[in-house]
Amino acid sequence: MMRNFSWPEKILLASPRGFCAGVDRAIDVLNRVQAADGGEQIYSYHQIVHNTHVVKKFEEQGVKFVENISLVPEDKTVVFSAHGVSPEVREKTKERRLNWIDATCPLVEKPHREVKKFAEQGYTILYIGHAGHDETIGTMGEAPDHMILIETVEDAETVQVSNPDKLALTTQTTLSLDDTAEIVAVLKRRFPHLTAPRSEDVCYATQNRQDAVKAMVKKGAESVVIVGSSNSSNAHRMREVAEQALKMKFEINGKGAAYLIDDVQELNGKESYFSHLHVVGLSSAASVSEEKFQEVVNWFKERGSRIVEEEVVADESNIHFASPQRLKLLEERAR
Ligand code: SF4
């Protein structure tokens, strides 16, 4: 396309971006279950990862996604999504004699273990997370009578507990690190005996993607586009982190906007959002394929962005999670 208007000359690409090890593993698990089960109808409890394009592709391959485990016919195979499930769902799965394969990210399992341990010791557990998110439902389901959800600083300021000396803390894995730190600071001030995990439960992928977004703003990005679906917590937090970083840097009108888009189609007709800028930063959430991200990169290039630079804050190439044991058994049986 001819460049006949002012257009950002440079685009910065965040690195790392896109698929994390937990998403990679969950997609691999569902693909392999389909291959091993030789044409049988496969079910996924919840979206395998929070991305409309990944889910659509699996639907086209014949996978059925359900929000209620009772919708899976008895004796069929169901895959639990990367976000984890509650003990209640596991129990129902057994009652229905379903063949289950668990694609829960190992880093989501950590807060599950912490909750179980603290609940057994009689603690009340404050859980920093978002209401209604699959991970929150799964983790809080480990000990619903022992847990209180904290979503905001206001919640942290007002929460009441019966025994402040037996109080523990755990968090969702895909939160904003800055927001979480603020909430934790309030809770620690109010409850000095609060038992917090040695390391944050916010995972490496969330941290790296947020750090990379901030690095792009520091390097000169005047606006940021995050590729990710609207039900992805990870994607929303990346957009918010970008917006906060941009606001701190720019007070000039027209600079400082951060956008969340599901795919390149959502950019069409929005050229005016960027045409007055020099540098735009691009990244993608942990459940977005590189293919979908590159479509956005090409959209900017086609309109005149000539300089493409990567802003690298971490190397994730060595991070992989082992496949679930039950998947290996399923594959052996299928041979
Ligand atoms: S974002 Fe973190 S917790 Fe979620 S699947 Fe990826 S690595 Fe696991």
Image (cartoon, helix red, strand yellow):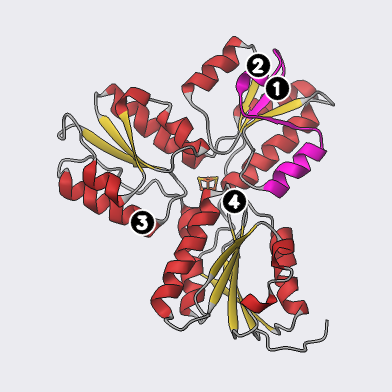
Which one is in front in this view, the residue at disc 2 or the one at disc 4? 4
State the SS at label 1.
strand
Q: Report the residue at 61% width, 21% height from top.
A: 69
Between the residue at mark 4 and the residue at mark 3, the CA separation in whole angstroms equals 19 Å
17 drawn magenta: no
Residue 255, image x, y percentages: 51, 79
Between the residue at mark 3 and the residue at mark 1, the CA separation in whole angstroms equals 39 Å
Q: Label 1, on which residue?
A: 77
For the C terminus, give its image quadrant. Answer: top right
Residue 298 position (above or below residue 8): above
Q: Quadrant of residue 307?
A: bottom right
Characterize the local packing of mark 1: few (<14), some (14-19) or many (20 or more) Cα atoms within 10 angstroms.
many
Characterize the local packing of mark 4: few (<14), some (14-19) or many (20 or more) Cα atoms within 10 angstroms.
some
State the SS at label 2.
loop
In the picture, measured across the screen, residue 151 lies left or right of residue 262, that is left
State the SS at label 4.
loop
Q: Report the residue at 67% width, 25% height from top.
A: 78
In the picture, measured across the screen, residue 49 lies left or right of residue 173, that is right
Which of disc 3 and disc 4 is earlier in sequence?
3
Indicate which disc residue 98 carries: 2
Identified by mark 1, the residue type is Thr
* Range of residues picked out in magenta: 52-79
